Amino acid sequence: MRRANLSGQLLPFYPEIDRTFLRRKNLQKAFQAAQESSEMADKLLKDYAAPYARGVRSNITRSPIEANNFEIKPAVIHMVQQNQFGGGLHDDPNHHLELFYEICDTMKVSGVPPESVRLLLFEFSLKDRAKQWLNSLPANSITSWEQCRPN
């Protein structure tokens, strides 16, 4: 097989050169596709729709706490996470809230209202669809416990 150059003259065909060129071209395409897919895999669709600084934002506005040495112990967070509400068909929101109130009421700190404790721990008590719902809300859209609890 022969190819023609610009002047119309036939040139000899070297199959090894063509195979090498095509192989390198295909490898380059695959590498570019892998780079693009890995960049896209790190982001969710909502990341493109709602920009925020370094991915840190909260849907719950927490009121300032006046107590000097107030902290939530990791054991309390762990207890809340053991009883997470997922929002599934068979999940009982009333039972979840009963357990949530029970855990939150174990923390009594002077100068810290119970509502503040609940707002701090509420995010930890959700998973799956319920967590997706919370994350879909605009930033700082929940400002009090009354807005979180069912009517």
Image (cartoon, grey):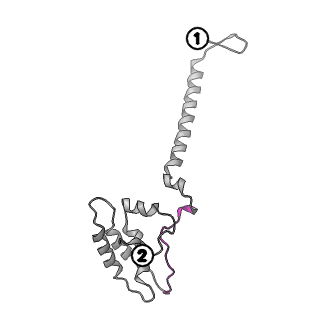
x 38%, y 73%: residue: 77
Q: In the image, what residue type sits under mark 2?
A: Trp
In which quarter of the view is residue 8 placed? Answer: top right
Based on the picture, tell me whether residue 127 belongs to the magenta stretch.
no
Q: Which residues are magenta?
A: 54-68
Residue 112 position (above or below residue 151): below
Q: Nearer the viewer, residue 136 or 108?
A: 136
Mark 1 and mark 2 lie on one chain; the one further toward the N terminus is: 1
Q: In the image, what residue type sits under mark 1?
A: Met
- Tell me the tag on residue 1: 1
Question: Residue 26: where, in percent of width, then height?
Answer: 54, 31
- Tell me the tag on residue 80: none
For numbered disc 1, what is the local secondary structure? Answer: loop
Question: Residue 107: where, in percent of width, then height?
Answer: 37, 83
Judge from the rendering whether residue 53 lies leftward or rightward of residue 151; answer left or right: right
For numbered disc 2, what is the local secondary structure? Answer: helix
- Quadrant containing the C terminus is bottom left
Q: Nearer the viewer, residue 96 or 74?
A: 96
Residue 151 position (above or below residue 34): below
How packed is label 2: few (under 14 Cα within 10 Å), some, or many (20 or more)?
some
Outermost residue toward the front in this view: 151
Judge from the rendering whether residue 134 lies leftward or rightward of residue 93; answer left or right: right
Name the residue that disc number 2 marks: 145
